[in-house]
Amino acid sequence: MHRSISVMPPISKRSCEPMSVSPGLAAARSRESPTTRSIWIRGHSMKHESVKQASIPELAAAFEKAAELHGQASIEGKHRAANAQYANLSAAGRELRTRGEDGRSALTQLLRSSNPRVRLWAASHALDFAPELAEAELEHLAQGPAGLVRLDAEMTLSEWRAHTRSD
């Protein structure tokens, strides 16, 4: 008997949203409309309208912090916290990409972070506008030690390459 295996993350019964989202899936979703209306900036949650008013350095810092917290929550199995941080980093990343060259530059600068989770998320968000840099970082992470970062980097590269071949 043949069984199919789903690569989708587990679904929360309450919200019908994925319990944790990998960067590969997140990169695909980042092109969709926002699913969140707040993000952490300046130490507190700001509504969607305030995200538009945040500076590029504030958005980059919020992205970096959310990527770190998402990784930690994922390791600890705290799906609600991971989902909240995914929403935060998605909102910050989406806004940075809309800010022109300065916003995109802030994302590519995060590829030099000392935290591999930050580099992973920054690379997944930079694939659309800096594919060479993003792919190089994802390849580097995919060669790293076994773990979630390596697996997510491998999956993100696989999905990206399948997507670019189909275009």
Image: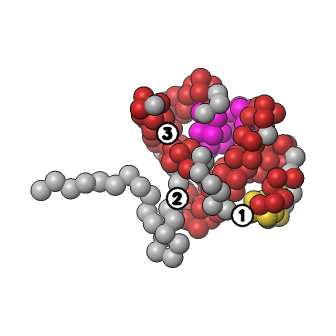
Which amino acid, mark 1?
Answer: Arg
Magenta run includes residue 83: no
Q: Position of residue 45 (x, y in %)?
A: 79, 65
Mark nearer the viewer, 1 or 3: 1
Upstream in the sequence, badge 1 or badge 3?
Answer: 1
Magenta run includes residue 116: yes
- For residue 6, side relative to residue 63 (left or right): left
- Of 23 and 127, the residue lying toward us: 127
Decide: is 10 above or below 7.
Answer: below
- For residue 156, side relative to residue 106 (left or right): left
Instruction: List the residue tagged with mark 1.
Output: 37
Q: Position of residue 59 (x, y in %)?
A: 80, 48
Q: Residue visible at 59% across and 46% down?
A: 31
| Prevailing secondary structure of the magenta residues | helix
Identify the secondary structure beneath mark 2: loop
Q: Decide: few, some or many residues near mark 1? Use Cα within 10 Å; few <14, some 14-19, many ≥20.
A: some
Decide: is 102 above or below 2.
Answer: above
Which amino acid, mark 2?
Answer: Ser
Image quadrant where residue 38 sits = bottom right
- For residue 122, side relative to residue 15 (left or right): right
Instruction: List the residue tagged with mark 3.
Output: 156
Is residue 147 something that shows in the picture?
Answer: yes
Upstream in the sequence, badge 1 or badge 2?
Answer: 2
Q: Position of residue 50 (x, y in %)?
A: 84, 59
Q: Position of residue 130 (x, y in %)?
A: 64, 27
Identify the secondary structure beneath mark 3: helix
